[in-house]
Image (cartoon, grey):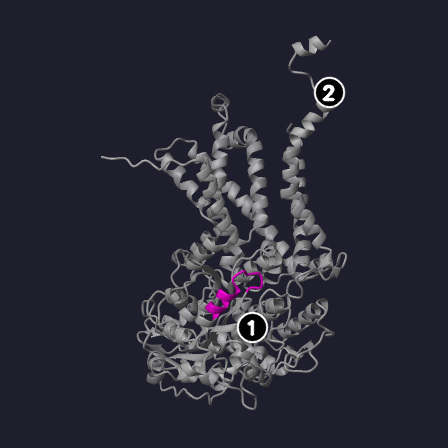
Amino acid sequence: MTITLPPAVSRRGLLKGTGALAGAAALGSVPRRARAQSKSLRILVAGDPFYYALDGLKQQFKDETGIDPQIESISLEALQARLTSSFVSNQPDSDVISVDQMWLGQYLESKWILPLNDLIKADADVDIKDYIPEVLYSMNTWRGQVGTLPVAAYGQCVLYRKDFADAAGFAIPTDGSWSWADYLAMIKKMNGQTFDGGKMTGTVVAGQQPAPIVHMYTQLAASMGTRWFKSFPASKAWDFDPTIDTPENLDALKLFVELYKNSPPEAVGYNWFDAGMRFAKGNIGMFYWWTPYSYLCRKDGYMSGKDSVIADKIGIVRLPMAPGKEQVISIGGHSLGITANTAERDSAWKFIKWATSAKTQKAMALYDKYGHQFSDFARPSLYKDPDLLKLYPYLPAQMADLQRGNGKIVRPPCPVYTTLEGIYGLNLNKVLAGDLEPAQALKDTQTFFSTILKGNFLIPYKQPSYDDTLEATKQLMASLG
Amino acid sequence: MTAALRANPVARPPRRLRSLLPYLLISPSIILLLALIAFPLLFALKNSFYFWNLQMSPNPMGFIGLGNYTMAWSGSLFLGALWNTLVLTILGTAIEFVLGLAIALLLVRQLPGLNVVRALLILPTTIAPIVVGFLFRYMYDPGGGLIPWLLHAVGIPLPPQGLLGSGETALASVLFADVWQWTPFFAIVLYAGLLSVPPDIVEAARLDRASAWAMLTRIKLPLIRRTALIVVMLRFMQLFNTFDLVLVLTRGGPGTSSRTLGYSLYQQGLMDFNIGLSSAMTWMMVIIVNAIIGLFAFFAFKDLD
């Protein structure tokens, strides 16, 4: 057995070595090279389905760029709280973040995220023309600036139990040529019928305050002609006078109450996922909800990978409309942006380009660890892809509804949206709970809205307006393409 | 003189330094306390006089005096939440105290298997309230949860919306989850207090044929009064700030039936980002809870040295 002794180190040698190392460190050559090899990127996103697919494919990004993406997911509320706290205290927390469309204006105007116009213009890889304009308009633009790019775009659609509808003789139109009155009438007929050895419930609503009930109700209300404000955002002079207490909104709310009456009573406390999973149990006739439930309801739990009892029995069609009213579909989802306080802007942009590219989006849809749990494309090209159509046959209906989408009408991204949503959600929930009559709820909501908007100096609106139209977004896309 | 000084190497500090020494020694603690407690409170106090909504601007937008306080007090939400909080806090503290005392009295009887019971009793208090919330959410599920099933089995009628979905039962359901988690805390602390009661006093009372009730109310409770009062105060303050259970179980609903001040504060501060209003509400809560605790301490401890 031999022992190798370390070579003797003289004091002069040690000093020389240390000096050389210090010099190299100061010049940055050695560490920079090491950093380039193991550069990492902090990505903070909401824990929606897109995260699981993205996380599963992140090695591809690392292989292509040498950058190690460290993706963390948290709930949407926690995300907003954490990001705001990070920005206000100027403590960089992440390089890439998912930004809800309701936060976009706040983040851009506070200079918490970087505008992407110049980056998109300088980079043909983005292929900005291959985006559904209605999606970019609803989710990613504020005052003529693209602040984020969509990584998951949601519309709303109707899901029904196909075998039950067929057996009971319900003819459900697939092209959206039906009214909300038809929808309610059908649900009333479905309610209480016996099928598959059990009693069917007509529908299910998401009644939890504040966000879930607002997300569900506002789709119905907008489709029946309700608008939140007198003129925002598509107007040369923004006017935030609320238009909540109107006959069309009252009709919508009465219809929503009827839907609740044909829903499980405990749905008054259901959040997004509760409502979806209640449908997935198999004894709900039909409901309308965000498009990711087209695949989520095929499973018996969130990312469980196990089929639900109705996995192959779900019919998916376009939303009903109101006669004589312009159809408007809610658009939501998640988009990626670059934090202004990051030191890794180039890597962050590379990641956003990769995650939102048609290639990666397709790979996310084909990712099978949890059983194909992603079809929330913002790029029209993917809606024509034969491989994807085979897996997600409802894509044409989804695309058709997204093209009628206007997220800025259904849930307008005004500066104090979250506060208004809190009030709206509370009063809608009170209606379902029987604590308020629909007319009184709308009157109260209107009064609260006025008070809040006046208190936040939005009524009268004295700041510069921006005529935020779909046409303006199309022009912007053309100028960046 | 010089020789004398040299002979005594430990020279006495000057009189002035001697008088300041205690303050110097205690100053690190005082500075730490001020930094950790006073600064955030004072910062919140300053913010409470400003219009500062992060949805509107990253910086305060102007001094508005008592505007935030007026807004909080005039809105029905604050008073409703205050009422719910008081109901939850007073009932919760009382129920947990009574049940905890009953368990503690059983524990001091030295029954077989007590070690296991003591270990089990600690378990609920070690679980994070948010996890307790999730556990109870499943247990309250109207479609097969344990609690509705048990209540149904014993013939207690349930609201069709479920225990968490009805305005009449939502707050009680939150309270029940809290009682489940924190009664053992009372039991353990009171048990420790009961162990300190001198056995000869209990024995003397027994020889005097004192009833069990008399022994409890005239001997044991007075002797553990100090411990009991402190644990009641602690739980009162904790319950007054209840937030996590409400967040997971009901989100303050249906309507505002289970909205507490803690949850309202969360909504104003971390969802609406109204820093000014939430700071004002924080100070209102601080004043209310300290007034209640101050009164409680004054009356409860006035005849104790």
- Amino acid at dot 1: Leu
Specify the label residue A477 is tagged with. Answer: none
Task: Say left or right for A334 vs B271.
Answer: left
Quarter of the rendering containing residue A34:
bottom left
**Residue closer to the observer: B57 or A276:** B57
* Number of residue marks: 2
Disc 2: which chain? B
**Residue closer to the observer: A188 or A284:** A284
Q: Is residue A262 above or below residue B138?
A: below
Residue A66 location (% of width, % of height)? 41, 63
> Which range of residues does the magenta coloring cover?
A339-352
Residue drawn 63% across the image and 79% down it:
A233
Specify whether residue A345 is painted magenta.
yes
For the residue labelled by badge 1, is the local secondary structure a helix, a strand or a loop? loop
Residue bearing mark 1? A116
Mark 2 on the same chain as mark 1: no
Residue bearing mark 2? B14
Disc 1: which chain? A
**Residue closer to the observer: A53 or B125:** A53
- Amino acid at dot 2: Pro
Residue B152 location (% of width, % of height)? 40, 59
Asked whether the viewer can see residue A249, the reply is yes
